[in-house]
Structures are given as structure tokens and as C-alpha cells.
């Protein structure tokens, strides 16, 4: 037998990029009566070129549940308008000032919840900090008014800035009882100009009104802020004039702004809006 036809050599001689295929088939030989006479074994040999298989792509993980956070009601409404379903429910938590949108309340494999966390408008943010600051040294308060006077609508912001610029220029300030209608925050300012000393009584306003949006995507609203000038002792025991800013209208103004956002979400057709917050618990099973 020639070496090329030798089975062992055939199986050994495999060129790069090819493969040797060996096929074995068996046929039983029978006579006319069906008696087995023997077997016929056929061996087929073939050398063929390999075809490269395309690389398999790794299996991708399932997309994570959507849990987007929105800082403006306009963005939430636009998103829900496109992706809401027949079972979308929005919960509005007035106490927390936030909303939670459940995209599919009937979802069997877990619900997806979007959250609206309203962002404080940049114009109102410094005023909110002021209202929570407590007693502020009068010179620091004067500087604050100069920086944020554009939000003040009553009294006139420019007039107020001019008044407090005089406070910053004073070399000495003392508290006194005010005069006339604005009789709460009276002070006496002592100034020195070219060696000359001047003393002027001044009545600071006991109330200012600002107008600005409380949250992003909400309209401006007016808020009255009460001012009280008093004497406070520093860490060394020295008396200093301080200003305390408070507002009894802020809580109601924030509630009104939140109610307007809820009304905006209610304008979406087919979306259930309820006051409250979403809550889910595991099912209890009978054993």
C-alpha cells in the first residue's frame, strides 16, 4: 500500500488550516431469505479546508432598573410623557417636598421608580442660607445685601444697597430706639471723613420683600423677610450689633410652589397622581 493511502499516515498528515475527516459506515449483507451473510464496512477519508468561525460575543447583563433623579419638574414631565405606561403612578410627598414616579405599578419583576428632588433656584439659595443662619454681624449682613440686592423688590434694592454701604463705611455703630413708622431697627452711625467725625441716626427697615423662584422650573414669588437688629456678645464678651432674618411666609411659599409642581404633573394624560410615597414589602407565603 502506498504511503499516501496508508490510514495512519493520512491521519497524521494534516496541513495548517485543514482537517482530515474519516467516515465509517457499515452495511449488513443478507441472502434472499434474510439470513445474514456478513458485513460490508466502508471507510471514507477526506481532507478539507477549515472555515474560521466568527468570534462569539460575550453575553450582556440585563439592563439595570431605571432609577433616574430629576431636579426640575419640567424634565420629569417630559420624560413621563415619552416613557409612561398605562399603570404609571406618581406619588407626591408634600412633607418631604419630593415626588416618586412608579413607571409600571403592575410590574411582576420589580418596579422602577423615578424621583423628583426639586433644586433650590440659585437666586433664592443665598436667601435660604440667610434665613437659617440666625444672628449675622451687621457688617456681614450689609455685604450680603449689596451682593444680593437684585432679588429685593421692597424697599428699592438700590436704595437699600446705598443704605447698607453707609453701614459698612461707619467706624462705629450703636443701637438706639427708632423713630416714626420704622421704629424697630434704629441705629446711630459714626463716620470719619478727612478727620471730621459725623454722627447720624438711621432707621433700618424691619422688613424687606424679595421676589425670585424658590425652585428651578417654578415661577418667581414674593416672600416677606423680617429683620431684627439687636446686640449680641462675641466670644470675648464684647457687644456687637447683629441682624436676625426670619420669614413666617417661607413654609407656605414652599408648599405653594410644590403644589404648582404637582399640578404640572397632573396635566399628563393617563397618569395617576396621589399624595403620599411608594412603599413595597415582600409577599407572605403559607407554609
Image (spheres, rainbow, N blue to C red):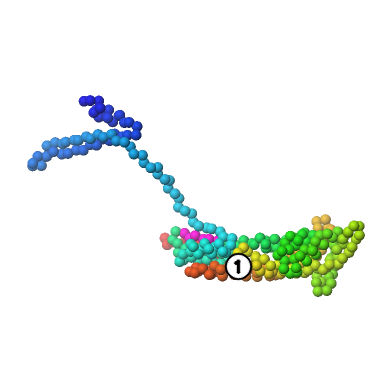
Q: Quadrant of residue 21?
A: top left
Q: Nearer the viewer, residue 118 or 82?
A: 82
Q: Nearer the viewer, residue 31 or 210?
A: 210
Taking the magenta stretch, the answer to whether it contains residue 270 is no
Q: Which residue is mark 1?
A: 258
Image: 55 above or below 182: above
Q: Give the residue at the far top of this rendering.
A: 2
Q: Residue at x 51, y 63 (%)?
A: 80
Q: Quadrant of the C terminus?
A: bottom left
Q: Position of residue 170 (x, y in %)?
A: 84, 60
Q: Residue at x 11, y 37 (%)?
A: 37
- Residue 143 in the figure: left or right of residue 96: right
Disc 1 element: helix
Q: Residue at x 68, y 69 (%)?
A: 222
Q: Position of residue 207 (x, y in %)?
A: 75, 69
- Residue 89 in the figure: left or right of residue 208: left
Amino acid at each position: 500500500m502506498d504511503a499516501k493511502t496508508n490510514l495512519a499516515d493520512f491521519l497524521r498528515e494534516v496541513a495548517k488550516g485543514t482537517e482530515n475527516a474519516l467516515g465509517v459506515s457499515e452495511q449488513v449483507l443478507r441472502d434472499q431469505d434474510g439470513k445474514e451473510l456478513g458485513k460490508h464496512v466502508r471507510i471514507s477519508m477526506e481532507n478539507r479546508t477549515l472555515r474560521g468561525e466568527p468570534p462569539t460575543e460575550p453575553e450582556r447583563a440585563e439592563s439595570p432598573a431605571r432609577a433616574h433623579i430629576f431636579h426640575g419638574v419640567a424634565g420629569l414631565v417630559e420624560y413621563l410623557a415619552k416613557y409612561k405606561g398605562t399603570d404609571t403612578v406618581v406619588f407626591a410627598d408634600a412633607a418631604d417636598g419630593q415626588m416618586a414616579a412608579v413607571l409600571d405599578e403592575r410590574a411582576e419583576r420589580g418596579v422602577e421608580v423615578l424621583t423628583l428632588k426639586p433644586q433650590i433656584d440659585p437666586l433664592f439659595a443665598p436667601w435660604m442660607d440667610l434665613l437659617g443662619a440666625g444672628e449675622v454681624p451687621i457688617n456681614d449682613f450689609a455685604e450680603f445685601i449689596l451682593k444680593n440686592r437684585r432679588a429685593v423688590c421692597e424697599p428699592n434694592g438700590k436704595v437699600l444697597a446705598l443704605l447698607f454701604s453707609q453701614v459698612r463705611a461707619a467706624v462705629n455703630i450703636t443701637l438706639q430706639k427708632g423713630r416714626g413708622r420704622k421704629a424697630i431697627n434704629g441705629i446711630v452711625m459714626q463716620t470719619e471723613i478727612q478727620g471730621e467725625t459725623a454722627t447720624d441716626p438711621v432707621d433700618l427697615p424691619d422688613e424687606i420683600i424679595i421676589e425670585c423662584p424658590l425652585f428651578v422650573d417654578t415661577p418667581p414669588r414674593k416672600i416677606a423677610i423680617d429683620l431684627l437688629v439687636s446686640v449680641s456678645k462675641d466670644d470675648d464678651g464684647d457687644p456687637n450689633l447683629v441682624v436676625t432674618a426670619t420669614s413666617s411666609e417661607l413654609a407656605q411659599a414652599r408648599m405653594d410652589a410644590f403644589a404648582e409642581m404637582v399640578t404640572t404633573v397632573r396635566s399628563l394624560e393617563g397618569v395617576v397622581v396621589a399624595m403620599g410615597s411608594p412603599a413595597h414589602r415582600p409577599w407572605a407565603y403559607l407554609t
